[in-house]
Amino acid sequence: MKKAAIISAIALVTSIGGQAFAQQAINVSQFMNSNISATTVGIAHDVCCNVGFSALAGANLAEVTGTASSVSWNNDQRFRGDATAITVGQVGNIGGNVALDSAAFANNATGSFAGAHEVSINSVQQNWIDPTAYTTANVFNIGGNVSATAQANGNVLNAAAPNAATFNVSAQQYGGAAMNGSVNLTAQNITGDVTGITRGFGNSMTLSAGGNMNIVGQQTMVAPINTTTFISANNVGGSVIGSSTSLGNVFSVGNR
């Protein structure tokens, strides 16, 4: 089992033409070469209010905030292991809502640079073994709504610089592992709505800035994405909604 995480931040102040400009260099290196799992098993009967059970398994998570006028962010995340999240619920005679959720991800990086005028990002994200999320539930006699979700994600990169005049990004995402997600929900005698949602995607980039953008993004997914939603619902007072979504590569760029 091998884990490594190196995070550093360097702040400098330089003077150009008699004006001071703050510079910030942020370097993130996260490597995980082992399995990670989270399991929640919940049994709840005769509860007055809301009930919620959830499980989250994630390998590498980086949340970066740049506060200087000029920010440089180098991000390197690599995962070689299984990330598995499982939620199981047996819930009955509940006065409020019931929510059961599971989520697994390999690499997730978010950068917020609200005060920066120049932003440069260089990011590499790779995962090699399967993120998996399973939610299974049997619920009955519920006074509110029932929801069950499962989400399996590979690589995620989000960055926003709403005030940046210059926004340069070079990003690479590689998904060498399958995404597996499923919801199995049995619901009886429900006053409100019943919802079951399963989502899985390999690579996702969402980038936004207020000024000029120079973006080079590469997304590669070489493994399957499997999502399944099963709902058995009887005597439901509201709506019954089920959906499954499988996406390989998602890329979104916009001016904000």
Image: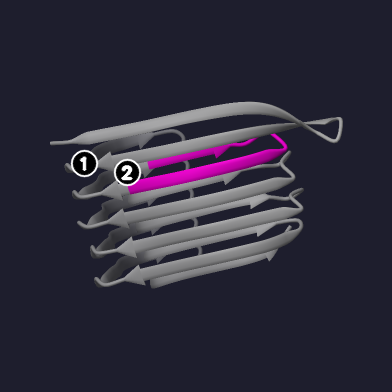
Q: How busy is the neighbourhood of tag 1: few (under 14 within 10 Å), some, or many (20 plus)?
A: some
Nearer-the-camera pick, 206 or 215: 215
Amino acid beneath label 1: Ile
Nearer-the-camera pick, 146 or 150: 150
Nearer-the-camera pick, 70 or 112: 70
Location of residue 251 in the rendering, given as x and y in whole percent from the top left corner: 52, 68
Q: Is residue 23 above or below residue 169?
A: above
Location of residue 219 in the rendering, given as x and y in whole percent from the top left corner: 41, 68
Colour mapping: one colour
For the residues bearing labels 2 and 1, Cβ distance under 8 angstroms:
yes
* 68 in the magenta segment: yes
> Residue at image x 57%, y 67%?
252
Q: Residue furthest right?
A: 18
User: Mark number for residue 58?
Assistant: 2
Range drawn in magenta: 61-77
* 76 in the magenta segment: yes
Q: How busy is the neighbourhood of tag 2: few (under 14 within 10 Å), some, or many (20 plus)?
A: many
Kindly indicate the quadrant of the structure image that contains residue 246: bottom left
Location of residue 193 in the rendering, given as x and y in whole percent from the top left corner: 48, 59
Quickly name the residue at label 1. Answer: 36
